[in-house]
Image (cartoon, rainbow, N blue to C red):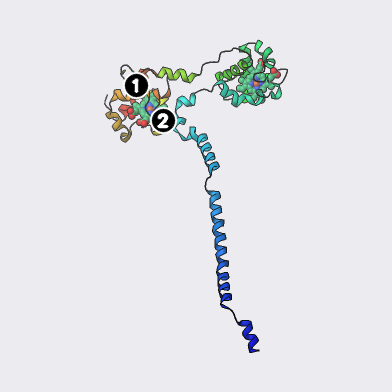
Amino acid sequence: MADSHAQMTRTTPQEVIVSIVAGLLAPLLAIVLIVMLVLDIQRSQTPDAAGEETQKAVAERIKPFATLDALDPTAVVAEKSGQEVYDTACVACHGSGVLGAPRFENKADWGARLAQGYDTLLKHAIEGFTGKSGTMPPRGGAADLKDDEVARALVYMANSAGADFKAPEAAAPAAAEAAAPAAASVPTPDLAQGKKVYQNVCSMCHATGAAGAPKPGDHAAWDARIAQGFPTLYDHAINGIRAMPARGGNASLSDADVASAVGYMFTESGGKL
Ligand code: HEC
Ligand code: HEC
């Protein structure tokens, strides 16, 4: 009895070691598994190459809004090219011929239509048109398109199908050229006129401080600028400086108007002419 009891409970040193090691190993294994799980989760959350691509794409897409370009009025008023308009407003139907729309680059679809002449086609594109094949909505359904933009899209499409129309010039590049010549001499500012020009053109940014435009009367923003002297400020207003567009983005402003507006802001902010 004593013997069998001794036999049942007797443990060899090897058995002791094995049980200790096994006892340690089980929790250790659990820990290792948990650590691996955590690492795996982390890995799935760190941006991999594809993630970076997406981020780049997003950054690219929000760029016009994320940068000051969005505040450049010359960019805002810049009209779309024929291809841009076509790609956004016309391709849906004219690309494939949906609803009977004459197809891009398809001479057969366009031949008889082109024979109507540019003016009729433009009228139909702007006002809309219901013909034998279907209904062309006014401005292709894009009501915010300017006449010139519709015209350019029409020219782009018609010329792809054999026409030789001339597209209306985009307004923006011409404006940029007009702004180029540097100021020869500084006109004498007319402050009453300057106030009007300021209110019509410059206040858009300068009244709110958009893009860092100095507000008239804000001495902290103007003191150092006034110290540059009126002629320098006038020159910067004519030619643009950093986020300040040439002539406030309005190329049709005369030198005298710009000088007057600068003079108005200059004196409102404590400068002496
Ligand atoms: C919703 C579809 C649709 C969109 C979008 C659309 N069109 Fe059309 N367009 C048509 C259809 C359909 C016709 C053919 C009408 C017919 O002759 O029966 C047509 C015909 C025309 C014609 C020929 C008119 C004529 O006298 O034969 C012109 C030009 C034209 N479209 C210009 C444009 C321009 C420019 C745009 C983009 C700004 C545009 N369309 C967008 C459907 C569309
Ligand atoms: C689209 C916004 C915008 C419009 C519109 C605008 N400005 Fe500015 N303007 C700015 C910004 C931004 C600055 C600050 C530029 C800087 O110092 O980095 C600035 C600065 C100036 C300065 C100071 C230049 C300097 O050397 O520090 C003058 C002068 C000025 N503008 C005149 C005008 C006049 C005159 C008009 C209207 C005819 C006008 N601005 C319209 C954005 C604008």
What residue is shown at x 47% (from left), y 26% (from top)?
Answer: 75
Q: Quadrant of residue 32?
A: bottom right
What residue is shown at x 41% (from left), y 33% (from top)?
Answer: 211
Q: Can the viewer see residue 206?
A: no
Give the camera-side residue of 223 and 121. Answer: 121
Image quarter (top left, top right, bottom left or bottom right) of the C terminus: top left
Q: Residue 260: which numbered mark, if any?
A: 1
Q: How far apart are marks 1 and 2 (CA)?
A: 17 Å
What element does badge 1 sit on?
helix
What residue is shown at x 54% (from left), y 56% (from top)?
Answer: 38
State whether residue 176 is above or below residue 65: above
Q: Quadrant of residue 228?
A: top left
Whether residue 173 sits left or right of residue 99 in the image: it is left
Q: Where is residue 236 in the image (x, y as percent from the top left)?
A: 34, 25
Quarter of the picture for ligand 2?
Answer: top left
**Amino acid of disc 1:** Ser
Image quarter (top left, top right, bottom left or bottom right) of the N terminus: bottom right
Q: In which quarter of the image is residue 262?
A: top left
Q: Residue 13: which numbered mark, if any?
A: none
What residue is shown at x 53% (from left), y 39% (from top)?
Answer: 53
Q: Residue 205: which numbered mark, if any?
A: 2
The response on whether ligand 2 sits within 8 Å of label 2 is yes
